[in-house]
Image (spheres, grey):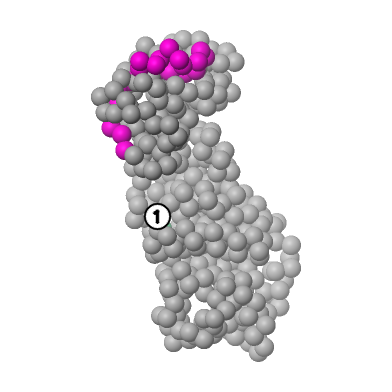
Amino acid sequence: MTDKTAHTAKNAGGGDVRLSGISKSYGSFHAVRPLDLTIPQGSFFALLGASGCGKTTTLRMIAGLEDPTTGTVFLGDRDVTDLPPYKRPVNTVFQSYALFPHMNIFENIAFGLRRRGIKSVKPQVDEMIDLVQLGEHAHKKPHQLSGGQQQRVAVARALINHPQVLLLDEPLGALDLKLRRQMQLELKRIQTEVGITFVHVTHDQEEAMTMADQVAVMNGGRVEQLGAPADLYENPQTTFVANFLGTSNLIEAEVVETGADVLATAGGGRLRVPGARCTDAVRTGGKVLVGVRPEKITITHADDAGSIADGRNRVTGRIADSSFIGVSTQFVVNSPAGAELQVFEQNVERDTRLVPGAEVVLHWNPAHTFGLDAAQDIDAGVETVEDAA
Ligand SMILES: Nc1ncnc2c1ncn2[C@@H]1O[C@H](COP(=O)(O)OP(=O)(O)O)[C@@H](O)[C@H]1O
Ligand SMILES: [Mg+2]
C-alpha cells in the first residue's frame, strides 16, 4: 500500500463494515452460515462464541484472508469482496503477535511506514508509542517486554497504517488473567482515543461484555443474537445466549394464562413473566422456559416464608450446596420446580441458618423474569471451552 492509498483510506470517512449473506463452507461443512451483519463505524464490536463456532473465519473474510463461499463484504459503500488483503483498509492483530525479534520496539512499530517508503517516521512512531504508553521501552527488543507490552506493540504496529478497521483475533488469549483484565481496559482506551472500528474476536464472555459496545453471539456458524452487552444479558433470546453469557436459571413451566403477563406453574409454584419478555407466542397449556438470573433471586429460610411480600415469584427448595466467596455467597438449591437452581446473595446480613439441607424459598420480582421457547435444548451453551483459540 502506498502512502497515498493509506491516507485515502484514513480520510475516506470510513463507513460501516457490512456483511451481506456471507458464508464459508469447506466441502460439505458449513463453518459460517449465511450471515448478515452491520458493524457500525467507530464501534468496538465483539464476535463472541465457543471454539469452532466460526469467529476466526468471519474475521478472515473481512480481512480478505479467506474467500467467502457466498455473499458480499462492504466497507462503507464499497464492495471489497474481491480485493486482496493488502488493498483493504484493514489490519489484523493475532493472538500470536509475532513481532520481529531482532528489531527494537520503535522499529517494529515503524515497519509499516518504512515498507511504504516513508523516510521521516519518528513523529508518527512516537505518537503510537505514546498511545500505547510504551515510552520508556522504545529501544528494547520484544523479548525484553512482558506479554501485555508485546501485545501493545502489535496494536501500535497495526494502527500506524491508519486502518479503517482493526481486527483482533483473541489478542489477549496468551496472557494470564490479571494481565488480560488490564489489557482489556487498555485496548478499550486506545479504541476510544483513535475512534476507529475494532472487531474483537473472543470466546471469553466477560471480555466481550467489558469491552464491546455491541456483541454478536455466535453458535454453530450463526449469529444467535446481537446487541449491547446489558441488553444481551438482560434479554437473552435463546437458551444458548442465556447460558453462555453468565448463568441463567431456566425452569420448565406450564402456561396457565396468557395476557400482559404470562402465568405459568412449575413444581407447584406459580410464576409470572412479563408478556413482553417472552420470546415466543406462548399459549395456555403449552410449555415455556422461565428464566431468572442468580443475582435477582432472594433466598429466605422456610421458617420466614410469611415475611415474603405478595406478588413475587417464588419457588420452594432445599439448599444442596453453598460457597462463601467474600462479597457474595453462591447457593445451589434443588427445587420441585427445577434442579440445581443458582442463587447469588450479597453478604450484607448473613443468615446462619442458610446451610446445606435447609428448606428455603427463592423469590424475585416478576419484572426480572424472561420467557424462552421451550422447544430448545435447555442446556445449550452451558459448557464453554476455556482454551479456545
Ligand atoms: N481451512 C479449513 N478447512 C476445513 N475446516 C476449517 C478450515 N478453517 C476452519 N475450519 C473449521 O471451521 C470451523 C470454524 O472455525 P473458526 O472460524 O476458526 O472457529 P473459531 O475461531 O470460532 O474457533 C471449525 O470447525 C474449523 O475446524
Ligand atoms: Mg478462532
Please report the residue visible at 67 percent of the width from the left and 61 percent of the height from the top.
Answer: 195
Mark 1 CB within 8 Å of ligand 1: yes
Span highlighted in magenta in the image: 302-323
Q: Is 353 situated left or right of 216 in this image?
A: left
Q: Is 382 situated left or right of 128 in this image?
A: left
Q: What residue did someone put label 1 on?
A: 26
Q: Nearer the viewer, residue 252 or 313?
A: 313
The quarter of the picture where residue 44 lies is: bottom right
Which residue is the extreme one toward the bottom?
119
Above or below for 170 versus 264: below
Q: Nearer the viewer, residue 223 or 349?
A: 349
Residue 352: % across, % down: 33, 29
Question: Split into 4 quadrants, where in the image is the N terminus?
Answer: bottom right
Q: Secondary structure at mark 1?
A: strand
Q: Verify whether residue 54 appears in magenta.
A: no
Residue 370: % across, % down: 50, 26
Q: Residues within 10 Å of mark 1 (few under 14, many from 20)?
A: few
Question: Split into 4 quadrants, where in the image is the C terminus?
Answer: bottom left
Please report the residue visible at 35 percent of the width from the left and 15 percent of the height from the top.
Answer: 303
Visible residue check, residue 324 = yes
Please report the residue visible at 41 percent of the width from the left and 44 percent of the height from the top.
Answer: 220
User: How many marks overall?
Assistant: 1
The quarter of the picture where residue 254 lies is: top left
Visible residue check, residue 23 = no
Q: Verify whether residue 317 appears in magenta.
A: yes
Give ligand 2's quarter of the image.
bottom left
Please report the residue visible at 56 percent of the width from the left and 20 percent of the height from the top.
Answer: 275
The quarter of the picture where residue 243 lies is: top left
Residue 388: % across, % down: 36, 55
Residue type at the position of mark 1: Tyr
